[in-house]
Image (spheres, coloured by chain):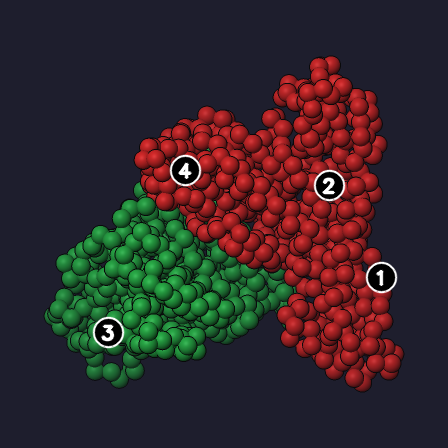
Chain colours: A red, B green
């Protein structure tokens, strides 16, 4: 493979180029032959598997969700039934027109999302209130034909999970929407060391076909927000459009309330940007494919490799994902740079001098902090140290996020905040899509990421565009 | 959902209809709107997840395989490079021609298998012998536009894993092919309770583009074989066609040796047919989504529900997948039929009379065998009992398989064996594709499932069609 010890562009020099360099040099992905499509290499896919493990447990235990798999194609005739939804997705559809060497009578849309397919399934299997609630989830890829793509952030194909649920009442459905969002938020805090901003989307930013969309947003070091997951209350629109009805408790035909929620491999993009630095990736320990790397110094010296193996065995037996790099064709310096690039959270060096004292040197990737520990204690101290690193990373990201929330009162202040500070600008507006469109235009791309609060009737705040009474306080930012 | 207590067609009356009834009534799948595509419902997908868990562990630990994800589309221009491969797959290709509302210049084939995509990836990342061996695997769906489809057995889209590896030498590659096949064989014996027939495919039956294909075949109760997994030695053909070369140990440019291997959700079809009976599914305990169901008898009687909960908690804490059905709107008889249909391996009944003796009645789904056990001992005896059920099922299937291997010497005997006994007929032939084609024609569908042995030069056996000296002893059967 290519030489991984080449320097990468620094973040301050060109953040976008830094990102492109890191995803390639850390061997997270490479480009496939079709523009906009990527190969997810083992180092990124292993992170995705950790996310899957965490999420599967939570949704199975707490939301009663069950995994399923539905087709990857939607007949065009069926695709066209829910008006807002099709308007949202038709422009970026990939469409198959030939099957078995024949022209298809009803062309097939490669799924961009599966609300329609789940609605079609639920129509078949839901007939009584006894069948509700129903909560299915699938892990799959979806296709959206994008003009401008970036690895993990926006691609013509990406991996995700999509949960789709039906309930008897609006209350239960809205509760499910919030619970799914809370699990996403926990996933950020507990697994990825990312503090999300959590809230409801504005009218202009909600999902095509939803009554309400909730989001988790992460803040990137270039000051832009990254929408990292969404949870939707779909109301009864899809059920009406696709004919899902059931015999209710009062023996009358009823229409269920629907939800859907999803996170994607975009989370990998969030991890890379939130934590990375000029030496490459910095991976949160709980998803890192390698959590600890052991590097012997002067490998030939007596006892060094033995001590390394002893540490390796002790950590391995605890289930820690540990690697011992005893390749004698590479120098320790080369290895240090290599594992820094790959963001391994903790490095353990063992050399003859340390060994003479019964010690080893442990270095945290996140901040370079070193600890000299007795080898005998590493077994006991390693797991807590990985937790400490997780917390270091979360606190660092939280501090950055909190330092990048600016209160603003008008468009000049908004522009100044977005251009000079970056991050979120907290501003009141009248809550109309028209005003949002105008704000986006006047700030060259500032959008409402989510609602901070709905304002009381007697507020004094005014919309900065229309001058009308403000209705909503929202976080505005530039976004990916 | 529909009433699941309806009777199903018996196997002897109409085996194909029995199969269709079972996959629907046991809620394994239902039909999607596009012909040939199905919805994998939770009850089948959970079995697939167990297969994934087993297989991921084995291939990661024993074959050094790493999971990845590659695109679902292959540009038509790239698809056409390996001649035999494209001839094999082009007739059943699903082809996308429109993306983002525009006609695509290079149409995209939805992957029917990913040899081409992996070759294209490996071309990018393999440059030195130090990069070998490389062994990537992916879990995904593939699309083959089929005219006649049956749930899990042959579909226009199905789920599978595909491993793709590169090696420096033919020997290493062929070793990998056999190791993957052995893992498939173990998976049958240890997880699915299915005895596979394992061997090399004949020339006529090998994979399009392979030098050698190895197979695992399972025998169905209707006497037909089901190809259940394959492992291929691809030689250097794909590497040549797609330009994968590396700098070898002698500092010369070399071409690697390639393998690929896969099993699919066809395994679900094998489980259903090998073990099922006229009461529905019979699931092997190690993949059953529910391994044990507890049914209270006279639920209102004092102590019955408490005793059920006690057993439930004891089994649950051991990690046994147990369900307690305390629905008071259904009779025990209805529940018995229901869990028989769903193939739950072990049923535990607790009623007032048993309880008075401190006992419960345990019934094995596979053979109806009952045991009356002290409730206190269930905790200890349940896991061994599930193993016993696994062995019962494996032995039953093995006996059936072994009783359906007939040695035959000519076409009359072959026809008699296939038509009257069913199963495999062991017959010698000259090893040519021409003879295989003729045998298939003269037996109305009998094909060589795999090679039993290559015959010595001085064999007396003759080909039943050409009269030439026989070269190969093979298992012939009708097949799915």
Residue A7 placement, left or right of A450:
right
- Would residue B197 be found to the left or right of residue B445 on screen? right
Which sits earlier in the primary sequence, circle 4 or circle 1? 4
Query: Residue B23: x and y, percent?
Result: 30, 54
CB contact under 8 Å: marks 4 and 1 = no
Mark 2 / mark 4, whichever is N-terminal:
4
Name the secondary structure under disc 3. helix
Label 3 lies in what chain? B
Q: Chain of mark 2?
A: A
Tell me if mark 4 has few (under 14), some (14-19) or many (20+) residues whose alpha carbon lies within 10 angstroms of its own. Answer: many
The one of B71 and A205 positioned closer to us in this rendering: A205
Q: Position of residue A413 (x, y in %)?
A: 82, 25
Could you give the CA–CA distance between mark 4 and mark 1, rounded to whole angstroms? 53 Å
Q: Is residue A189 above or below residue B426?
A: above
Q: Residues within 10 Å of mark 3 (few under 14, many from 20)?
A: some
- Where is residue A354, by image quadrant? bottom right
Q: Nearer the viewer, mark 4 or mark 1?
A: 4
Residue under pointer 2? A219
Q: Marks 1 and 3: CB-CB under 8 Å? A: no
Residue B166 in view in this figure: no
Q: Which residue is mark 1?
A: A369
Question: Which of the image's four quarters has the C terminus of chain A?
Answer: top right
């Amino acid at each position: 493979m290519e030489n991984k010890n080449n320097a990468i562009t620094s973040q301050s020099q060109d953040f976008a180029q830094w990102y492109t360099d890191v995803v390639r040099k850390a061997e997270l992905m490479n480009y496939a032959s079709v523009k906009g499509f990527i190969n997810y290499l083992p180092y990124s896919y292993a992170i995705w598997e950790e996310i899957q493990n965490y999420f599967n447990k939570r949704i199975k235990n707490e939301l009663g969700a069950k995994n399923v798999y539905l087709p990857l194609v939607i007949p065009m005739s069926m695709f066209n039934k829910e008006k807002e939804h099709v308007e949202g997705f038709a422009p970026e559809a990939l469409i198959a027109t030939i099957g078995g060497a024949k022209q298809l009578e009803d062309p097939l849309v490669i799924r961009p999302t599966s609300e329609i397919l789940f609605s079609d399934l639920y129509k078949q299997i839901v007939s009584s209130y006894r069948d509700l609630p129903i909560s299915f989830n699938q892990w799959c890829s979806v296709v959206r034909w994008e003009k401008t793509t970036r690895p993990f952030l926006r691609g013509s194909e990406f991996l995700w999970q999509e949960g789709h649920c039906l309930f008897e009442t609006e209350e239960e459905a809205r509760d499910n929407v919030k619970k799914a969002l809370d699990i996403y938020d926990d996933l950020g805090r507990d697994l990825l060391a990312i503090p999300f901003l959590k809230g409801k989307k504005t009218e202009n930013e909600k999902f095509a076909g939803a009554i309400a969309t909730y989001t988790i947003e992460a803040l990137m070091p270039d000051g832009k927000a990254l929408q990292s997951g969404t949870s939707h209350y779909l109301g009864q629109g899809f059920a009406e459009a696709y004919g899902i009805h059931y015999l209710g408790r009062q023996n009358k035909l009823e229409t269920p309330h629907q939800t859907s929620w999803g996170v994607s491999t975009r989370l990998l993009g969030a991890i890379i940007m939130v934590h990375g630095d000029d030496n490459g990736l910095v991976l949160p320990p709980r998803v890192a494919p390698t959590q600890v790397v052991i590097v012997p110094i002067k490998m030939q010296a007596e006892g060094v490799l033995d001590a390394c193996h002893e540490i390796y065995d002790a950590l391995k037996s605890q289930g820690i994902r540990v690697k011992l790099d005893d390749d004698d064709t590479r120098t320790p310096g080369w290895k240090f740079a290599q594992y820094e690039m790959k963001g391994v959270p903790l490095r353990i060096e063992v050399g003859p001098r340390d060994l003479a004292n019964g010690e080893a040197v442990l270095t945290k990737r996140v901040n370079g902090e070193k600890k000299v520990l007795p080898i005998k204690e590493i077994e006991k101290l390693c797991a807590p140290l990985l937790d400490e690193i997780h917390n270091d990373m979360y606190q660092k990201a939280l501090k950055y996020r909190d330092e990048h929330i600016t209160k603003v009162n008008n468009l000049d202040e908004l522009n100044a905040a977005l251009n000079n500070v970056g991050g979120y600008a907290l501003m009141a507006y009248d809550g109309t899509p028209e005003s949002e469109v105008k704000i986006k235009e006047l700030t060259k791309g500032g959008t409402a990421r989510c609602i901070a609060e709905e304002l009381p009737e007697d507020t004094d705040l005014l919309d900065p565009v229309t001058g009308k009474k403000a209705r909503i306080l929202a976080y505005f930012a530039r976004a990916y």
